[in-house]
Structures are given as structure tokens and as C-alpha cells.
Image (tube, rainbow, N blue to C red):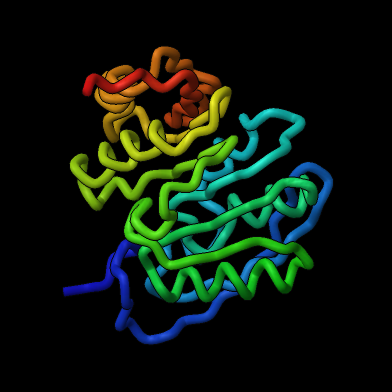
Amino acid sequence: MPDHYFTPLPQSGRKPARFSFSYRGQTLIFDTDSGVFSRQGVDKGSHSLLRALPKAMAGTVLDMGCGYGAIGVSLAKAYPHCCVTLADVNVRAVHLTAANAQGNGVSVRSLVSDGFSALNGEFFDFILLNPPIRAGKQVIYRMFADAARCLHAGGQFWLVIRKRQGASSAIACLQEHFDQVETADKSGGYWVLRCVTPRAKEE
């Protein structure tokens, strides 16, 4: 059974790679490896999400399912006053994230977490997600619900999803958890969604 990027402990042989990436006036270098998502460059979905984010960001940021850190490390470089946490179930990805943060001169927190399980009830101003589509809807929709529970008042949940991989059904699910679900960008088959005002849960 081959490794997936959401495999907790990848067993695939190492295939290190390195590439540069520019974001909001900053040039970053990323080291990647086999067993992580999009090892040869920042994927189109993450690029779309990064491009659509607000031009000014502050506060606490969670990059959920961070991979090797493309989204979270880029934001930490562009907005050094943000407090950025990056989490992934994949141990190899989290090790790469820590190394990429150090290599790009940014201070972040990186941790191994199966979804939100290791975050111990923390709250964030921004939660960002490029969901692991191949993990299935049950996993992804649980992340949506957990994101709604982990936002500060006034916080924002941003995610990117391809239209053909279920954007419409994802919006329907998100509307069960948030009062406002907006399409911030549509380009190249990717939809960037912004969700605010989590719905109150009935006791």
C-alpha cells in the first residue's frame, strides 16, 4: 500500500527536493521529500488560497494539514507579527515544516496532530486549510466542524477546494457550521472559501 500525504508515518524511500517560491515580496526556499503533498512545488490550490488572503493579517493563525509548510511559513515570512501554528498528521511533513521555518528565518510552532486533536481547545483568529481530499469527506467535514469550534469571535476560516472535487457539497456542509460562507475567489478550477460567524450549537 503506497504512502499518502496524510499517512502518519510515511515509509517511502527519501527523495529530497528543493525549490523557491515568492509571496508578497518575500522569496522563500522550501525543502520537501517523498511522502508529502506536492513535493516539487507549491500546488495550485495552496497558491490560490495564499493569493486570496487579506492583504493585512494579524493575530493567531493555524495552518491545518500544513504539509511541508508552504502556506504557514509563507505567511509567517510576510507577516512576522502573526503567531503561526502549523499542524499535520504526517510526521515527515512536520519535520520538514520545522526545518523550512528555520531555513527561512521565521518563528512558528509546528506539531503533529490528527486533525485538531493535539490543539487542546485552542482558539485562532485565522484557520487555513487546503483539505486532504483523498482522505475522504468524513475526515474533511470533521475538520470543517472543528474549525468552527476553534475560531475566536470575529475569526475567519479560509479553505480552497477544486470545483470538480466537491466544492458545491463542501459549501453546503460549511453552511451547517457558519452563518456566512463566501466565495472569495474562483480561478483555474479552484474555489477559495471564506467562512465567518460559527453557528451556535444546540445543547
Residue 168 can be seen, yes or no: no
Q: Residue at x 76, y 31 (%)?
A: 56
Q: Horizontal and vertical percent for residue 79?
A: 77, 45
Q: In screen coordinates, is 101 left or right of 171? A: right
Q: Look at the image and tell me in which quarter the C terminus lies.
A: top left
Q: Is residue 120 above or below residue 191?
A: below
Q: Residue at x 38, y 72 (%)?
A: 35
Q: Quadrant of residue 65?
A: bottom left
Q: Horizontal and vertical percent for residue 66?
A: 49, 56
Q: In screen coordinates, is 24 left or right of 111? A: right
Q: Residue at x 64, y 35 (%)?
A: 51
Total marks shown come to 0
Q: Residue furthest top?
A: 179
Q: Horizontal and vertical percent for residue 12?
A: 32, 82
Q: Look at the image and tell me in which quarter the N terminus lies.
A: bottom left
Residue 118 can be seen, yes or no: yes
Q: In screen coordinates, is 26 left or right of 172? A: right
